[in-house]
């Protein structure tokens, strides 16, 4: 009896949580920045974000914002304190990243996700991701 309860509990643990939906390589289909003052930026196919089960990941992001090229290719750590919140922190503290922050997961499906965040200055950032 104890063995079957342990097996059921282990199976339930493996099939719950955020792991299966979050982990993997995600295409950044759209990255949008809206500063609420008429200056907005919208870019498509900005690169990829790889999220590993062990709390690490890799960013390979390239986009053009307001006639300036941006590149963000570095490893990061991620945590998910809630099923609708993910925090990304790059391992390289000398380079700033627009993606290093806490994101609210607005929509979370197996193959598509939408994340939103703010910079604290009335600017809203949106990431639309699709599973590779």
Image: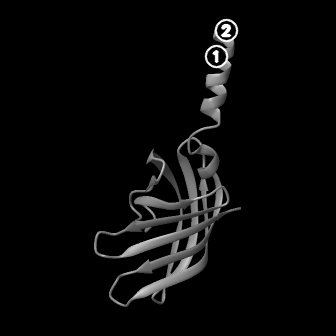
Residue nearer the viewer, 20 or 26: 20
Coloring scheme used: one colour
Residue nearer the viewer, 125 or 68: 125
Q: Which mark is residue 33?
A: none
> What residue occupies the far right of the structure in this picture?
132
- Tag 2's secondary structure? loop
Q: Is residue 62 rendered to the left or right of residue 96?
A: right
Contact between labelled residues 1 and 2, with CB atoms less than 8 Å apart: yes
Percent x, y for residue 26? 64, 61
Query: Mark 2: few, some, or many residues within 10 Å (few <14, many ≥20)?
Result: few
Relative to 70, is 11 above or below?
A: above
Whether residue 125 is visible, yes or no, is yes
Identify which residue is drawn at 60% across, 38% down: 16
Percent x, y for residue 113? 58, 62
Identify which residue is drawn at 66% across, 55% down: 110
Q: For marks 2 and 1, give the CA distance.
A: 6 Å
Relative to 82, is 67 above or below?
A: below
Relative to 64, is 90 above or below?
A: above
Percent x, y for residue 60? 59, 65
Whether residue 90 is visible, yes or no, is no
Q: Which mark is residue 1?
A: 2
For label 1, the residue is 5
Percent x, y for residue 101? 40, 60
Q: Quadrant of the C terminus?
A: bottom right
> What residue occupies the far front of the structure in this picture?
1
Q: Quadrant of residue 45?
A: bottom right
> What residue occupies the far left of the structure in this picture?
121
Relative to 102, is 47 above or below?
A: below
């Amino acid at each position: 009896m104890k063995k079957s309860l342990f097996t059921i509990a282990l199976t339930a643990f493996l099939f719950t949580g955020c792991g299966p939906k979050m982990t993997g390589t995600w295409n950044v289909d759209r990255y949008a920045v809206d500063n609420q003052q008429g200056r907005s930026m919208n870019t498509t196919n900005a690169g990829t974000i790889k999220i590993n089960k062990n709390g690490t990941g890799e960013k390979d992001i390239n986009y053009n914002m307001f006639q300036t090229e941006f590149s963000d290719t570095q490893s990061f750590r991620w945590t998910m304190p809630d099923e609708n919140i993910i925090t990304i922190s790059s391992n390289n503290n000398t380079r700033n990243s627009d993606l290093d922050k806490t994101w609210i997961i607005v929509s979370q499906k197996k193959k598509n996700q939408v994340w939103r965040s703010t910079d604290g200055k009335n600017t809203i950032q949106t990431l639309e991701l699709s599973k590779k």
